[in-house]
Image (cartoon, grey):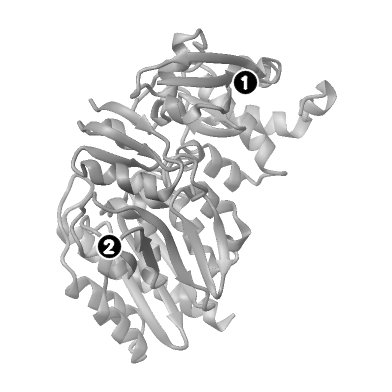
Amino acid sequence: MKVKITVNGMLYNKHIPNDMMLLEFLRKYGYVSVKRGCDTSNCGLCTVWVEGKPVLSCSYPAARADGKNVTTLEGVKNEAASFGRYMTEQGAEQCGYCSPGFIMAVLAMRRELTNPTEEEISNYLAGNLCRCSGYAGQTRALRAWLHDKPWEKEGQA
Amino acid sequence: MYTIKSYVFPESLEEADELLRRDCRSSAILGGCCWLKMGHRRIRWAIDLTRLGLDQIEVKDGWLELGASVTLHQLETHPDVTSRFDGILGESVSHIVGVPFRNCATVGGSVFSRFGFSDLTCALLALDATVVLYRGGEVPLAQFMATPISFDDILLKVRIRDDGRRAAYQSARRSSTDFPTMAVAVSCLDGRWTVSVGARPARAVRSEQAARCLNDGLGAAAAGQAAAEELTYGTDLRAGADYRRKLAAVLVRRAAEQCMEENKG
């Protein structure tokens, strides 16, 4: 079928297989930050935004994204890099494979929740699994980032 | 591995119904698609309802109405839902995987599929919800849950009478975002109780005996014991039947006590 999907502001007018998932569409067109993890809707690695809301691209039909705006990590790279520096400072990455999905969830949380509590943060990010870090470093990075609010200085939305 | 031959966005419910009627067995009404890849269906017509405005949450004529395309995350965040029934609808779905998943999974997909592990159907059952089907009309959820799945109708919305009842939800999981090992919901309106038990691991059902214990003032522990004895429990990779029976007794007691506390408040 034919779809028009806008990814990070760029319009793709393409023919796609009817059973293609958004993850495959995005990777096909070079958005390789989007990772295939469990491929069964469990791990959060493939998180992207559709119309600003985080979704699992491995389970989101590409056809359903027709006419919609999709954002990947490449589309928020300045803010992602800013948060990434906090992760680096806290040694929050080991293999780093989960980071794109995790960062997309973190940035979505920042937009959705105002001054989230520890419980709200845990609840929001519970679906983004990391198999090597144990979450302690990411939690420290997140706390520091939310405390510093670098996006206010950097003029991000 | 699933395959889809034709992916269609019907422009009306009539068109969706017509497409479904062409071949019910090889057509599929798409919900959140979260489990689609786990199956092996060869779908002739994949019918996507997301352009039909079924993603609305409304309070109308004394009812809370949840459209079939409402996402589970909407249940956690929409004030018309979170402010009612002690927030059990949002609470019941808040342990399901994570927010990106819950932004995909829908009320319609969860309810129509009648999954045994569904937290949402367990909570809705305790609230005396009804489902509205395109052809079948409005039927009580309890009746709907007792029927085998047939793919010849379209779930349009779920309705819950906005009667101000108090409610509580409890579940146990092996890990925080896993399927529930056991799920329990209770509600109380004017001293009349409703108790539902899900993830047995079979579909959620009501425990009439547990409700009777609470109606008769026999206490939360007696209700828990009644639910454990009345209903059947099974074994799967998460828990054995005996363990589930014990969990049911504990969770029904806790949910009933929580609801009693809310009633006092």
Determine the secondary structure under disc 2.
loop
Q: Residue at x 77, y 25 (%)?
A: A156
- Above or below — where is B265 with respect to B58? below
The residue pinned by badge 2 equals: B204
Packing grade of label 1 (10 A; few <14, some 14-19, many >=20) is many
Res. A49 in view: yes
Instruction: State which quarter of the image contains the C terminus of chain A.
Output: top right
How much space separates mark 1 and mark 2, taking CA atoms?
43 Å
Question: Residue B125: x percent and y percent?
Answer: 35, 67
For badge 1, the amino acid type reads Met
Q: Residue at x 58, y 47 (%)?
A: A119
- Above or below — where is B31 with respect to B158? above
- Above or below — where is B67 with respect to B22? below
Q: Classify residue B128 as left or right of residue B44.
A: right
Give whichever of A155, B56 is nearer the camera: B56
Q: How many marks?
A: 2
Q: Quadrant of residue B138?
A: bottom left
In front: label 1 or label 2: 2
For badge 2, the amino acid type reads Ala
Q: Which mark is residue B237?
A: none
Give whichever of A86, B47 is nearer the camera: B47
Q: Classify residue B209 as left or right of residue B14.
A: left
Q: Which mark is residue A87?
A: 1
Question: Residue B149: x percent and y percent?
Answer: 21, 54
Is the C-beta separation of discs 1 and 2 under 8 Å? no
Question: Residue A91: x percent and y percent?
Answer: 58, 18
Instruction: State which quarter of the image contains the N terminus of chain A.
Output: top left
